Amino acid sequence: MTMKVSDVLAFDCGPVTWRVSCSDIMLKEKISSDPDAPAQGLVVAGLTDCIGGHVVINPEQSEDHMRATLWHEAWHAAYDAIGGLRLGSEPTEDEVILQLSSTLLDTLRRNGPFTAALLSGSTALAYIKEQGQDNDLPEHHGQSGAQEQIARNRRGTRRAKNRLE
């Protein structure tokens, strides 16, 4: 089974559990409520709401573009997790990479579904499976603690809604 970006409900980065949504409606709502939003008519691939701990991906992209967008937004989450770069006005490449690399590596290691979605269809994932080392990666349909909690909350909301109807 191939893990898709739309299957990722959340990922942990630093101390924050970031909710992930693939919704063009939610993306438009967040953009319209932001005074610093991009110009009208500009297509946005995704965004990271650092205050709300929410990543929104535009689902109108191809799966490969959605993977790249999720990774891009994870960099924003990592930037937020480290409190932004405090390096002065002209940081060197190594200063920037030093601050972000360990946070991003930790994010990949702690979030099986997130990592599986990013690697889905790649030679890296094929290599891991071929070597029999896929024991280190959860099943593609497995969920991290963050994802499982969000899934439980969504199921509970649906049950409550069904009882009301």
Image: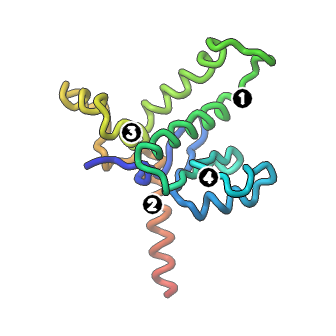
Amino acid at pointer 1: Gly
According to the picture, the residue beneath numbered tag 1 turns out to be 84
Q: Position of residue 150 (x, y in %)?
A: 49, 56
Query: Which amino acid does the dot numbered 4 rest on?
Result: Val
Position above or below: 122 against 29: above
Precedes in sequence: disc 2 or disc 1: 1
- Which of pointers 4 and 3 indicates the residue nearer the eye? 4
N-terminal label among 1 and 4: 4
The residue to which callout 3 is attached is 112
Q: Which mark is residue 43?
A: 4
Secondary element type, mark 3: helix
Q: Nearer the viewer's eye, disc 2 or disc 1? A: 1
Residue that appears at 42% across and 30% down:
109
Kind of residue sitting beneath label 2: Arg
Element marked by disc 2? helix
Query: Which secondary structure lies at badge 1?
Result: loop
